[in-house]
Every structure is written in C-alpha cells, then in structure tokens.
Amino acid sequence: MKTEVVKPQEIFYAPTRLLVPLFQRPYVWKRERQWEPLWQDIVRLIEVLSKHDTSATHFLGAIVIQQVHTGLGSMAAWNVIDGQQRLTTLQVLLDAVHSELERRELHDEAARIVPLIENPANMLRSSEDRFKLWPTNRDRAAFSAVMTASAPVDYTVIEQSQLRDAHRFFAEAAREWLDADEESVNERAYVLVATITDRLEIASIRLDAHEDAQAIFETLNGRNTPLSAADLIKNFVFQQMPEAVTERAYFDYWEQFETSWWEQDVTSGRIKNTRSSLFLWQWLVARMRDDFPIREVFTQFKYYASTHPGGVVELLPMIRRAASRYREIIEGATVPAGELTRIQLFSYRIDALSTDVARPLLIWLDEPEQATISDADRVRILEILESWFMRRALAKAPSQGSNRAIVDLLRQIANLPAAEVADAVEGFFASNHTAVGYWPGDDEVRAVLSEARAYTGYRRSVQRIVFEALEDAKRGYPDGRRLAMGPIIRGK
C-alpha cells in the first residue's frame, strides 16, 4: 500500500485507465450537496491564491485504487475501490471547463486540460481506452456522451442523466465566472485551469494487486456513510467472485437491484432503507432464522456467506430467485382490480396494517426447500397468520416484538416434515400467551368491536380492509362460490 497526497494533474496526466468495477454503485452526486459546494470551494481557493496565500490548496478527500495486471505495452490500469464519485466528478468538471475554453477559442488553456481527460492516440487499443476513467456499466453511455460532445455542447441533444446535468452545471458555472471580467478573461482562464489541476488535493491510497481491497473499502464506507447495506453487500459479493465470471454473474443475478423499484426508499418501523437493503435483511432473517437489526445486515451477510458451503457463487442465484418472487408478490398486491393470489391478498392486507414482519416467513415459504408443502397447507398458513395479525390489530395488542415471534415460529417449523408445518403454525400461535405473541379469541374481538369507536379508533386503512373483506366474503372471495361481479375494487 502506498499513501500520498496528489493533485488531479498527477492522477490523470500519465496514460492510465481508472476502471470503476461494474458492481460499484452508479454516479449519484447531486447539485446541492456536491457540485455547488465543490465549485464554491474552487472559487474561494482562487480568491485566496490571488489575495492572501499563493501556496494555498484545498483537500477533496480520499480515493482507493488497486493495480490491475495488464499486458505488455498496455497502459497502466487501476480498479477504483473507493472514490469513484469524486474521480468521475473531476473528469466531468475538467471536460466541462475544457468545452467552455474551446467555445471562447482559448485553445492554449484548453490544450492544458486535454492530457488529463484523454489518453494519447498512439496508446489506444479500443475506443474506450480514450477515457482516463471508465465508469460502471450503467453510466458508460451517459459518460461517453458528455465527454465526447463537441464544443459548444448542445445539452438538449444528449439524453438526460446525472452526468449530463453535472457537465452542464460546471460548464455554466465556468462560463459565468469567466464572464465576470471580460477584460482579463485570458488570465482568469489560466488561473482557473491551474487551480483545478494543481491546487486541489486528494489522498491517494494505491494498493498492489494482491492486497485486500475489501477490507479498505469497508473501513472507509461501512461506518456512518450514505452507502446502503445493499451497496456494501454487492461490493463484498463481487470481490469474492472469480474474476472470469464476475461480469456475467452481475448481469444474471444483481443488475435487477440497480433499478428504481429496488433503489426506492421504503420505511420499516420508523427507519428508511432502500427496498433492496430491506429485502436482503428479510431474506437473511429467513435463511439464518435469527432476529437482528437491519443495521447489522452487512456484517451478518458476511458471516453467513463465509459459513455457507457454496459461498457467494451459490448464494447469488438463491438471492435472485427470492428477489423475483418478492417483487412479484408486492407488485401484484398493488393491483386494485381483479382476483389476487392468496399470498398477494395476504401481502395487500399486511401492508394496510403497516407491518412487514411476516416477510421473512413468506420468503421462507417460497424457498425451494419448502416446495413439498401442499397448496392447501400454504393457504391455511396464510389464513392463520392473517387472523393473528388482524385480530391483534382490532384488539390493539402491542406490535412491539412481533418480529421476534415470527423468527421464533421459523425456528420451530424450519426442520419439520412438510405435512406437519401448518399444524405447527397454528399450534405455535394458539399456545402463545405472551403479550407480544398471543392470538385474540372470538370473545375478546367481539367485546372490543362492540365498544370500539370504529371511525376514530382505527386507521382508515384498517377500516377499509375490514369492509373489503366483508364485501368479498359476500361475493365468494377469496374462496367459496364466486359471483360474476368479481371481488371488490381494493384501496377505495
């Protein structure tokens, strides 16, 4: 490991390829939180250099890169282990300033930037080799589009992306700053280029090919950072994969998690997480049958992967299969019209109760190991769970500890013969007399409902699913003699 403080000039000048592994998260920096503060820091630094301290610098943060073995005569190449957002932003910033200088025909100053954003033509073996940095697969088209656009850049013909917007922001910021004093624009252009290339500082940690990049990554990002649990798990998984199969495995098993549905923030309890992180936690609870907080999911995943006989190579297809079914159930439950499958109806109703503690059990039921549980028993298990949740909601039983009850249930039924599982589920709840686990009986529910101020005592979502269930029962749903009119429109 070699650690030093370097400038953009030192990082980018020599022919080099900085490769962002495809399992890294895409470009996520934004105007308010990153682009504007960076530009303001550059402007302040120029002012300090010109008026107070000619040796002033500004520290941007750290990067971690790991050497990649390349063939004879090839350019040096490095995998970006950490700092890809920072490095990508610097490349876009440099290119945006370059385009503004070219637009003004300040060719000498623009030429000083070219070696920092493009490798020399005589070193190129493919079109991608042109770029000093090559981002993760989701950003490549957008990155290439802005970095190859001719000056003056017409942003209206470039497809919208975070990278296009970043390039446009820095180009407009540079234009405004240069326009502030037309009489000395040549001098201002010189100072701007020199400040960006030679007075910004970055702590560079360079690893040899054999060093443990994952340990460095976790230390930098595993504590109090915006990286999600899914980000950390992804990096860990693909660091463990044989290099020859990494790309194929990513596209086959992980790419789905980097879509808007999976990246959406969802609330569990009072905590927000990406849906992918929430799923991975619930999947891991189902596999390990252990109750642990979501903040520990990355640590628990590492332990589980290290003790699983097939390692991450076998876990990825399992995760992919469970995730597809998970999404199918949740999305199916949101369809307002028509008949749902029993598990989708169950999902719809527990969502109305604002609880997702049953998700690990649903995941467990859908695993291949439980394939021999009969359809009738699956329906019975869902009916028992639904009754337990619904009666507790009507009786206003405490919800704290429900997740623990589900984990305890999983432990009891996990190794039972398929034919005994449904009976065991019913027996578990029928025999549980604790405040967090008991199953309210008919007399208690009748007593509560006969005294309840229903319209003010229950959330509207709870009232709604009760009335929907009553109406559907009259129509013969979810079982019975179905009437031609179909089930009620849900969610109205």
Image: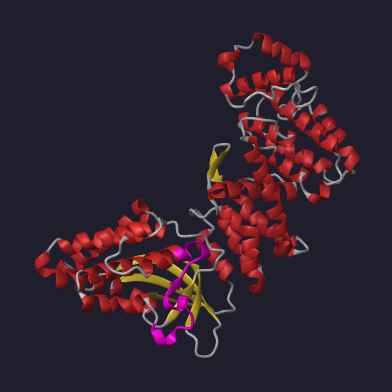
The spot of residue 36 in percent (x, y) is: 31, 55
Q: Which residue: 80% across, 23% down?
A: 480
Q: Is residue 352 left or right of residue 479?
A: left
**Image position of 315 with respect to 442: above or below:** below
Asked whether, in this view, residue 191 is left or right of residue 213, the answer is left
Q: Residue at x 54, y 84 (%)?
A: 70
* Residue 233 shows up from this direction: no
Above-or-below relation of 126 to 95? below
Q: In the rendered image, is residue 330 in sight?
A: yes
| Front-most of residues 3 and 155 | 155
Residue under the image location 78 percent in, 43 percent down? 365
The colour scheme applied to this rendered structure is secondary structure
Q: Residue furthest left?
A: 183
317 or 446, which is in the foreground? 317
Q: Looking at the picture, how far across and down is residue 445, in whole percent?
A: 72, 16
In magenta segment, residue 131: yes
- Place residue 199 in its image quadrant: bottom left
Compared across the picture, whether 230 is left or right of 409 comes to left
Compared to residue 208, the image places residue 233 above or below, namely: above
Seen as rendered, the residue at the extreme top is 450
Region rendered in magenta: 120-141
